Image: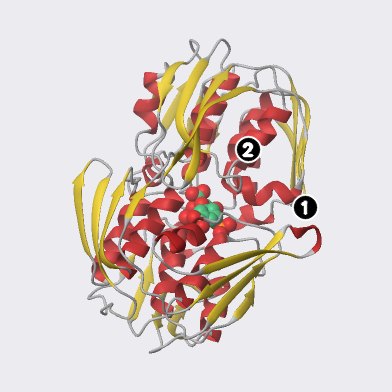
Amino acid sequence: MSHASDDPQPLTASPGAPLRGALKPPGDKSISHRAMILGLLAVGETRVEGLLEGDDVLRTAAAAEALGAGVERLGEGRWLVRGVGIGGMSDPAATLDFGNAGTGSRLMMGVVGGQPVTATFDGDASLRSRPMRRILDPLVKMGTEVVSEAAGGRVPLTLRGPREAIPITYETPAASAQIKSAVLLAGLNAPGTTTVIEAAATRDHTERMLRLFGAEVAVTPHGPGGQGRAVALTGQPTLRGTDVIVPADPSSAAFPLVAALVVPGSEVTLRGVMMNPLRIGLITTLLEMGAEIERTNEREEGGETVADLRVRASRLKGVDVPPERAPSMIDEYPVLAVAASFAEGTTRMAGLHELRVKESDRLEAVAAGLEANGVRFEVQGDDLVVHGDGAAPQGGGTVATHLDHRIAMAFLVMGLATREPVTVDDGAMIATSFPSFLPTMRELGGRIEA
Ligand SMILES: O=C(O)C1=C[C@@H](OP(=O)(O)O)[C@@H](O)[C@H](O)C1
Ligand SMILES: C=C(OP(=O)(O)O)C(=O)O
């Protein structure tokens, strides 16, 4: 895991004055990828508002264009996609380079894998290290040919899709919205019903957006306690281009939110944050820890509930975070570990195995960052246990980010409130999901310098 970007940008966060102000976090990354992808697969025009213009999503937009869509930027966050319809894609002239993006690459593998096109997928050193077998296995059952792949089922890899996909029923081996989505997207070109069964419900943006574009998707509770889902898609619908409004990303909101909790005297309002129940495990957890987070002005935006969150600096206490909460906060554990290091008592985060296959091995990367900054913790199997004593950790460390935006942002948040500044070795990847992170944090009063 010695990956670094071509042009590493070290950043240092220093403790300082309280954070104050209001902001709207950037558009949701998951929904932004899906808007581009369904825009490609629809007939007619899709207009997107509030698109996250982060590197990950821009790569998905470029891939949609390479597969035949017309993609045009109309203004800030406003995009127009002219779709080709299911079955209407053409072979891209060059390799589809997804950069750092697991979601973009894996969902597009589902698209290509279900249609009569051939495409090569690649990405940066981080993406090249991530497992793709979890996507290829169901796609092969649906008729996709894996023409070539790097060792261990990784990118670069080339897929050739069938004339028509085979409809399957697939039980996902991991709680992963990316696996679920890839199978459903391939199922769009299957003559019959494609069903995905997941043991624990994961984010449901693909299902919601498929319906918005005109597909028939039936979702029923599954398994003991009804915690899982069976998602059944009726194949070969005509998807019609439509308007998509992208709400603010709760996973990006998490960084200024935790910063406001741990920097003494802070008060910050986050506007229009998506409150999809399958995405807000972090807020549930922070409330249990004693965080003052007031949820106001709830309203509907683009088919999702959004709210304003008023956050005040709070005395946090340690809690147990149950493993079944992981899917609803999977990307938020690095910043939760930071919050836990300021809390009084022990926070146990259980069942974090999926963190090992993100942009970095996040369990290892978080542990190393805590270690470097004087936080007491243990990694017990796939659990992370953080011991806080209700005071600011020492800080003063340099954190290796391993091409991982969330590791970079989490430890910069930490450094706004530790006793000594915290340095991250490379902040370049922050642009993948939260390009305005630095100006946003600085506007609130945070001291983060190159
Ligand atoms: O479907 C999505 O948009 C995402 C699903 C999650 O990944 P997994 O499906 O691997 O859990 C998450 O970590 C990622 O940031 C976005
Ligand atoms: C895991 C993440 O993204 P992806 O899988 O799309 O690279 C993330 O954004 O934290």
Q: Quadrant of residue 226?
A: bottom right
- Which is more toward the observer, 281 or 41? 41
Q: Position of residue 312 (x, y in %)?
A: 58, 17
Point out the image quarter for the C terminus: top left
- Which residue is rendered at x = 48% and y = 47% of the image? 404
Q: Position of residue 427 (x, y in %)?
A: 41, 38
- Which residue is rendered at x = 65% and y = 22% of the image? 393
Total marks shown come to 2
- Are the residues at dot 2 and dot 1 in contact (C-beta closer than 8 Å)? no
- Which residue is rendered at x = 36% and y = 57% of the image? 35
Return the mark for residue 381: 1
Q: Is residue 122 something that shows in the picture?
A: yes
Q: Quadrant of residue 157?
A: bottom left
Q: Position of residue 295 (x, y in %)?
A: 57, 26
Q: Amino acid at mark 1?
A: Gly
Vertical order, 296 against 249 (above or below)? above
Vertical order, 427 against 18 (above or below)? below
Find numbered disc 1 in the image and state the secondary structure of the residue it sits on: loop
Return the mark for residue 282: 2
